[in-house]
Image: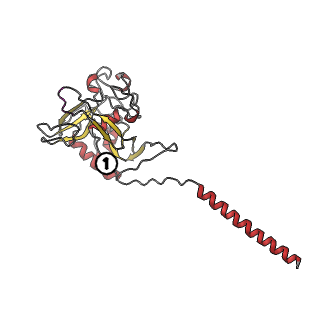
Amino acid sequence: MRTNRKLWFVAIVAVLLACMAVTVDAKVKKGKKKKDVIVCTHKCPLVKDTSGKAKNLTFTVNGVKFEMVPVDGGSYKTQKCDEYDPTEEKTVVLKSYYIGQTEVTQALWTAVMGDNPSRYKNDKYPVMTVSFDNCQVFLNKLNELTGKNFRLPSVVEWQFAASGGNKSKGYIYAGSNDLNKVAWYENNSDGKLHVVATKAANELGIYDMSGNVFEWCSDYDNGIRSTSPDIGPGLAAPTAYYCGGSWLFPPKHNEIKYKESARAFDKNDNVGLRLALDK
């Protein structure tokens, strides 16, 4: 009889210990942090690294890789680049977005379009000799291939990113007050284009926002009024804007605040593009 009681006691203790183990295990599992599940739709979500900071997005199209750098939203004060600039000087508040780490290369353009229109050819050079209208065709095809919604940055988005965004140190050029450190321009380019990302990056880790080639922006003027309220009244013909200076232009044109315009169908050896993507 005593033996049976001992066996019952041992069995009850075993059951109690097992229950306690299950409870402790459940608490441990409950306390574990869940891994973030990143689901990409037509607007890529904010992707963070282990430190909680947004990180670059990498894409591959027909074997060609390119990176997009996160730009946290903030405010930017627009400036006139010269006395003829119709820009209204005011503070613009921007939402977060991504922007190309480099200009669109000839390799990426060819991977998307199947040909290379550039006058001076090299896969690692920025694409050139492309009009604003050509860029729209490129963007449509890129979006079909990736399922994303890549676009051109607006002038203000471009300038905000070039200035270093919320990390800006107030430089005249993108990343420095010494243009030779960050740009290929009239005085150091030897009269030619250069491979992207061979000069120093700016505060956000973005290359060549001053120099190499001007970059088309999304602000379009249909001859009546600009689509951007930050640029000012429209010009006399369908026109688009570009920023960034180039390998053939002097320091003034490579300043962050500088921008120019051209007809949307014009092609120029000095003008390429850089991608943007909404977060």
Magenta segment: 83-87
When the figure is inspected, residue 235 is found, relative to residue 47, above or below; the finding is above
Q: Residue furthest left?
A: 236
The percent coordinates of residue 165 (x first, y second) are 37, 35
Residue at 30% x, 36% y is 158
* Quadrant of the drawing holding the N terminus: bottom right
Q: Is residue 85 magenta?
A: yes
Report the residue marked by disc 1.
142
Q: Residue furthest front?
A: 90
Q: Amino acid at mark 1?
A: Leu
Q: Residue furthest top?
A: 187
* The image quarter in which residue 206 lies: top left
Q: Secondary structure at mark 1?
A: helix
Work out whether residue 107 or residue 224 is closer to the camera in this orientation and state it. Answer: 224
Residue at 38% x, 37% y is 101
The percent coordinates of residue 61 (x first, y second) are 37, 47
The percent coordinates of residue 73 (x first, y second) are 36, 41
When the figure is inspected, residue 124 is found, relative to residue 64, above or below; the finding is above
Work out whether residue 54 or residue 199 is closer to the camera in this orientation and state it. Answer: 54
Can residue 86 be seen? yes
How does the figure colour the protein chain or chains? secondary structure
Residue at 40% x, 46% y is 59
The percent coordinates of residue 270 (x first, y second) are 25, 31
Work out whether residue 125 or residue 256 is closer to the camera in this orientation and state it. Answer: 256
Residue at 34% x, 44% y is 95
